Each structure stands twice: as C-alpha cells, then as structure tokens.
Image (tube, rainbow, N blue to C red):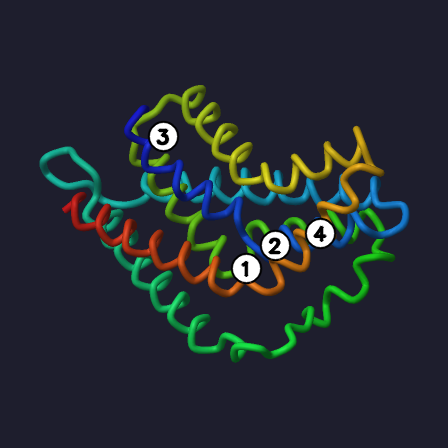
Amino acid sequence: MSTAIGELLPLAVAIAISVSTIITTVLMLLSPKAKSRTVGLLVGCVVGVAGAVALFALLPGLLPTQDSGGSSLAGAVIKMVIGVLLVVLALRQWRGRPAEGDHVELPRWMAGLDSMMPGKALVLGLLLSAVVPKNLLIALAAGVIVGEAGLSVGQASVVIVGFTAIATSTVAVPVIANFVAPSQTRGPFETLREWLLQNNVTIMVLVVFVIGVVMIGNGVASL
C-alpha cells in the first residue's frame, strides 16, 4: 500500500496544479454569487477524479499477468505509453506558448463563468478534472497503479479518497477560504489570477514533462 501511495502522490499533485482548473476556480470566486457555483465546481472535480481513478483501477484485472505473478506486462506498457504521451503533450504546449511580452487572453469558454449556474459548474468540474487529456492520462496511470497494487477494496477506497483529496485541494482550499473570509481573499485571488495567466504554460509544461518521464521510468521498472 505504501508503494502505491508513493507512486500516486506526484500524480495527485500534477492534477492539483492544473492551471485551467485553478484559474476557473479563481474566476468563479471573483464573480457575484460565487459560493453556489464554486461548490458545484468542487463537487464535479471530486466526482471526476475519484470516478476516473476508480474506473481505471478495474483495468489491470482485465489484463494478463506475468508468469512471475508480478505486474502485468500490459500494465507496464500502459505506463510507458502514458509517459510518452505526457512528454509529447508537454512539448506541444511549449511550442505553442505565447511569445514573450504578448498579452495573454483567457480562453473563450471562460467568458461565461461569472454567470454559470451551479449545475453547469458541476459538469465543468467533471470535464476539467477527468476529461481534459492531461488529467485523463494521469487518472488512467493512477488507476493502473491502484489496480496492480493488490489492495483490498477498503484499502483501495482509502487510497483513492486520499488521492482525490490531494488532487482537488487547489479547488477545495480556495472555495473553503472564500466561505470563511470572502472579503480578505479577494485581493490574493486577483493577484493569483494575473500570475497564473502569465506563467501557466511554463508551470504546466514542467509538471507534465516531469510526470511523463516518471511514468516512463515506472513502466520500465515494472518490466
């Protein structure tokens, strides 16, 4: 169980620092009547991460195992393929980064966040946490790790809950802080928004690249 937790921790952090999700959270928190829609976003993120990892955890049981009784060869190959895809994704994001000094615009889909209903915010949380390519690949990798760890249902549930708590912490903490002290958090949220807009590509490329290399290494080690 401890080995699985050690492998899952960087993956949970990689989902947690998804810049699009953080910016979405901050924009919603800065909008009027933010509490209901940010709760919807948080619920969507939690369900998306936990559901995706739990679903993918079933995958190793469908794969043939090695004669030695260890991790499946297919599982190792899946990890390496995920790693390669993450590295390719990171390189593509780096090549498509804005030129230095260019004004960074928000994506068009973020324009309606300040008037989004809680139900749509929940769906958006699902999409951001479990459907966007980076997070989907990471959830797949996490599910494979959980599925191959040989855990009981109770142990796997605890691991997935812990993984989800870390992966969604960057949404949960600002939402809770806004409930506790809304007036005191507005200034820091505005500052964070501007900083993320200027540095989001660098952050994501570095994180995705490192996680991709780690996944390739884990796959090779499982052979």
State the residue at coordinates (83%, 40%).
35
x and y percent of residue 175 in the render?
Answer: 73, 38
Question: Are the two marked residues, 2 and 1, in contact with CB atoms closer than 8 angstroms?
Answer: yes
Of the residues under marks 4 and 1, which one precedes in the sequence?
4
Which numbered disc covers residue 132?
A: 1
Of the residues under marks 1 and 3, which one precedes in the sequence?
3
Name the secondary structure under disc 1: loop
Q: Nearer the viewer, residue 50 or 72?
A: 50
Mark 4: give few (<14), some (14-19) or many (20+) Cα within 10 Å: some
Of the residues under marks 3 and 4, which one precedes in the sequence?
3
Which numbered disc covers residue 123?
A: 4
Q: Which residue is mark 2?
A: 128
x and y percent of residue 186 in the render?
Answer: 79, 45
Name the secondary structure under disc 4: helix
Q: Amino acid at mark 3?
A: Ile
Residues at marks 4 and 1, CA–CA distance in whole angstroms: 13 Å
Identify the image quadrant of residue 182. Answer: top right
Residues at marks 4 and 2, CA–CA distance in whole angstroms: 9 Å
